[in-house]
Image: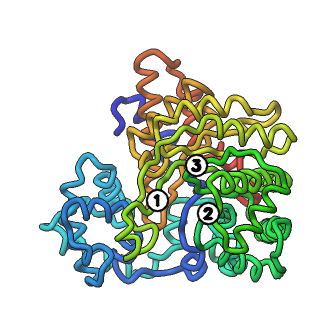
Amino acid sequence: MLNSETAKTLYHQYAKDMPIFDYHCHLSPQEIADNKRFSNISEIWLHGDHYKWRAMRTLGIEEKYITGDASDKEKFLAWAKTVPYTIGNPLYHWTHTELKRYFGIDKLLSEETAEEIWEECNRQLQQSDFSVTTIFEKFNVKLVGTTDDPIDSLEYHQQIKENENIHTKVVPSFRPDKAIEIGRDTFNEYVTQLEEAANMEINQYEDLLAALDNRASFFHENGCRISDHGLQTLPNETASFEEASSIFNKKKQGNELSKKEEEQYRTYTMLHLGKLYHSLGWAMQLHIGAIRNNNIRMFNELGPDTGYDSIFDYHFAESLNGLLSGLEQENQLPKTVIYNLNPTHNYVVATAIGNFQQGGVRAKIQFGSGWWFNDQKDGMLKQMTDLANNGLLSTFVGMLTDSRSFLSYPRHEYFRRTLCDLLGSWIEQGEVPNDMDLVGNIVRDISFNNAKDYFSIQGVE
């Protein structure tokens, strides 16, 4: 992936040894607190990985060997059968980089090598120096930001904080999607759960907002400095507090809402939360544009996050600028990182962020890294090039794993190689000065320093 001597120099001298600031992922706080050890390679590598599941289904592997009741070894053998067919997909690079970086295995995974690799990985997993904390140390992970619901007790985060043997900073992120998506059938049930977590009754809309404020304060006390939102669309339907209250009451009474009412509630609630984050000094992440659980039959059988999501197509320039402007009007716009899933929206995001930068704050509004279907070489290159064309690539907060797997840290290497090859090509073509200190320091900043400075989480050096 390093196609010039300049790219090689940038990677090996400036990027390779930088620490990792993994500010957004879906790792389990309980598994971190327990310093979990894994019984076999399938448990740490295949469980919950819907990237791999989609590839296996495409090859015609039976669901039994993907999410079904087959043994872990049978599932691994099914994945090994699939891997040679993933050439051209980032899974091919990720798979072999992970085997190399974690287990020192150089052989290509296939049906022919599956048995040998299964045995070798499992042998190493049983060694005393192969656990969650040793993985963090091996990859020099300075921070992990998990994704947590407001109703979470954060008990495992508290255990992590008290454990002197865990040297990586692990912090929760506040993800209140279930309180925002009033159109879901489970909304009223969730409000009841929020009542219990906040230890208060939620009879009116103002009670709901107070409960969210309550939980945000609790999260803040436990180290949270980042929120996260997974939104199919950004709402953009102006509403007063009275209108949002009426809509909440209507839903609580079990009545159907119109699409406009849902959007009014979502808009007012998002604006309230944005102001809350600003008051707490948090950064807000917006993951926009996934259409989820599209295969209804399989959703009913397997549930969410099982590999049936895809890219949504819609227009959101007005709603994006509207949300940011609504917060900026009252001078309560927090630091914000915007991720779009549809790459056709890159210029929409890259130009919108320039409207809301603030003097005295370095790159306050960020165009987030290539996300989900775009966290591969082409998607990363397009995101970085589009950001550079319309803003300042040098201030970019860089890569995150966004993963449920402890074996995903080589994705930072994959990103850094892509970054160095891009900058190296610009130098080789004479578009950028051949100044290794200038460009190398930009590489270091994007790899780690920018994120560390942007999120300002104490205890990360």
Q: CA distance from mark 3 to mark 1?
A: 12 Å
Q: Which residue corresponds to the image point at 17% horizontal and 63% vertical from the top-left?
A: 110
Mark 2 lies on residue:
183
Q: Quadrant of the C terminus?
A: bottom right
Q: Depth-wise, is mark 1 or mark 2 nearer the camera? A: 2
User: Can residue 164 be spotted in the picture?
Assistant: no
Amino acid on which disc 2 is placed: Gly
Q: Which mark is residue 233?
A: 3
Image coloring type: rainbow
Query: Compared with residue 152, is residue 136 higher up or lower down, i.e. above or below?
Result: above
Residue 214 in picture, x, y percent from top left: 83, 70
* Residue that protrudes farthest toward the left in the picture: 112
Q: Is residue 274 left or right of residue 313?
A: right
Mark 1 lies on residue:
292
Nearer the observer, 89 or 193:
193
Q: Which residue corresponds to the image point at 60% horizontal and 47% vertical from the top-left?
A: 448
Q: Which residue corresponds to the image point at 62% horizontal and 59% vertical from the top-left?
A: 142
Tell me the element at label 3: loop
Amino acid on which disc 1 is placed: Arg
Residue 339 in picture, x, y percent from top left: 56, 45
